[in-house]
Image (cartoon, rainbow, N blue to C red):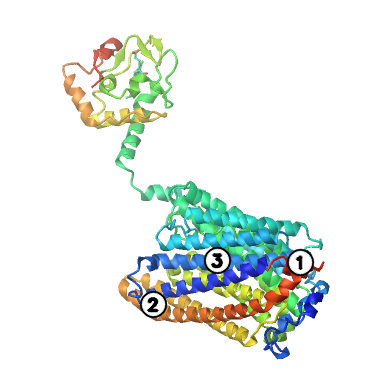
Amino acid sequence: MAVMFLFSSALIWLVIGIVLGLISSIKLHGPGFLSQLSWLTYGRVYPASQNAVVYGFSAQALLGIALWLIARLGRVSLQGPGMIVVGGVFWNFAIAMGLVGILTGNSTGYEWLEMPRSASSLLFFSYALIGVWALITFHMRRERQLYVSQWYLLAALLWFPWSYSTAQLLLVVSPVQGVMQAIVNGWFVHNLFEVWFSFLGLAGVFYFIPKIIGQPLHSRYLALFAFWMLAFFGSWGGVYADAPVPKWVSSLSIATRVMMLIPMLAIGLNIQSTLSAHCAILKTNMVLRFVWVGAISYLLATLLGIVGALRSVSEVTLFTLYTNAITNLQLYGFLGMVVAGGIYYIVPRLTECDWPSTGLIRFHFSTATLGVALLVLPQLIGGVLQGIKLNDPQVPFLSVVKSTIPFLGMSTLGELLLLVGNLALLVNLLKILPACCTCCLGRVSNSTPQPKAVAVGGRI
Amino acid sequence: MSSDSKKPSRPASPSSGGANRPQAQAAPGNSTAKETEPTAGLAPTPIWLILLFALLFYWGQLYLDNHAGGFDPQVYEPYASVKQVKAANPMSDEGAVIAKGEAVFNQMCAVCHQISGLGSAGQFPPLAGSEWVIEPNPARLIRIPLHGLTGPIRVKGQDLNLPVPMTPFGETLSNPDLAAVLTYIRQAWGHKAPPVTPAQVAKVREETASRPMSGSAPWTSDELLKIPVTQ
């Protein structure tokens, strides 16, 4: 069962990623921690953790949700589930290779492209395998009328190979010279988040919210407007204000970043208008809660990103914890929550089993929400304070570093909570799997024409 | 589906009673085919959002007008324009020499050889592309403006017989000025010959001290060709 495979392995990477993140986070306030192991020095653990969460968890789980949504919204069964599982296996293999590469010191040194070349080529290949079958499924759809989420998904499917291969080509295969490297890298990271992840995550948000409250999405036009704005302005940014590049590059980046205010408002308005009359469901429905927190995190992260990009603000916040706070809000707040909501919604439909424990779901929600807040808020506040002090020549550098320690301690706590919460999800998932294998096996033999059943029956 | 109902394997987890079922999956899998999928309403995009978009777009243009340094790749933070960059960055020695050489050339030589260095047919020979100019060893080249030049000469493969001789500059131009102008013509118009130093000019002056610089003893092409340039 292709989607289930992607979900489970994604969760395992999430746990690995958070554990690595926890190690790196502890190192920030206790530098002696595990310092004997060269594999686990900060410069290696931190990128390894980011890569595990970005490619292992977010990308993989979102692809799983995307596949399910494409099949579901097109009212067809998922095409080529076998090939997708093969792609998924390679994907996980590539990430394992990549992480080992990073931890042994073979990182390329480019943010979010740290995996050595062999791993990234394999990653690209497996993406292609999965992506092609996703496109074929999309093409075979029986429901011709497209829903909002499908635009976002389709664009995302095509966006990743474009930006990933471009960045790989220009940075790793035949590297461009000088400041161009920083520009390409900034562009890639920005595209990955502001466009690719946003498209995938928002496709989920735009599906689950109206679906669960049983009402149509407020406005198709507003969603379309936001889509084009994101696609157009989202891909320009990524070069920070005082970067050592020609001034017009960073200015253009700032100007387009500010334009992101428009899609942000459009998306927020759309969600708010859809939900406003149905807030009561938020109290009872866990999936909706997860997705809702995810959507809010998205809006907040976008806003913080815009503010942080402004010249006057970035003078203070650049090179501080502020930037980490936004990344974490995007990764754990937006993507993490939407994915969790999606998994809670989709898995019972795939397996036809209930979640063994509702308590664990509630527990996951509270720990994850609290964890994100604890991870992000101290970094935001600490980052701004840190920036103000750094800009003050009177304050010695060491005392600036020391003053961030309490904030870092709190973030570590947040990260710990996230770990516990996601372990709850993993436990729940591990419990549901054996319970269902039996019924799935029974299902393979008589594949019913119903779209859902085929999606289940393709593979164990 | 039938196998499902036959086998009692469903309630694998005894705890999955009704109370334990999250709302999200109130509708179990079997009914999904009939499930309605979300649709989107047709509410229009609010006009204020579009106005805000126009406003921000306008702001963006103004911002780029003021902060993009005219899209010139030389403009980095914290400068706002090429002018500021040039003003703030003192020229390198080499740049200064070239700039001075260009000034001297435009003032002294361009009357005859033209600013383009192409000369004028039948009167003044071209400097651009001339083998006299780009010869790596400047021993012959330095002598030309010191004492002047006359008689038939071969430039860029053409035998020329020009009506007037070239005026000498040995008395009007100092060693650094001569070095600068020669460096300039060796690097302008796409030339890439090594620069000429004031010391080299001084050395030639010494070697030719006996020769008058008043214009009474200009060099001839044959004389110059006898001076060795392979060292």
Chain of residue at mark 2: A
Q: Residue at x 48, y 51 (%)?
A: A171
Residue A403 % position (x, y): 36, 78
Reading the image, the residue beneath label 2 is: A404
**Dot 3 and dot 2 residues touching (CB under 8 Å):** no
In the image: residue A157, left or right of residue B212: right
Q: Which mark is residue A56?
A: 3
Q: Residue at x 33, y 32 (%)?
A: B101
Q: Is residue B107 above or below residue A109?
A: above
Q: Residue at x 26, y 26 (%)?
A: B172
Query: Which residue is nearer to you in this view: A60 or B156?
Result: A60
Residue A399 % position (x, y): 32, 76
Chain of residue at mark 3: A
Q: Which mark is residue A236?
A: none
Of the image marks 1 and 3, the number of the one nearer the N terminus: 3
Of the image marks 1 and 2, the number of the one nearer the N terminus: 1
Amino acid type of the residue that numbered disc 1 sits on in the rendered structure: Leu
Q: Are marks 3 and 2 on the same chain?
A: yes
- Quarter containing the C terminus of chain A: bottom right
Residue A202: name its quadrant.
bottom right
Q: Is residue B217 above or below residue B118?
A: above
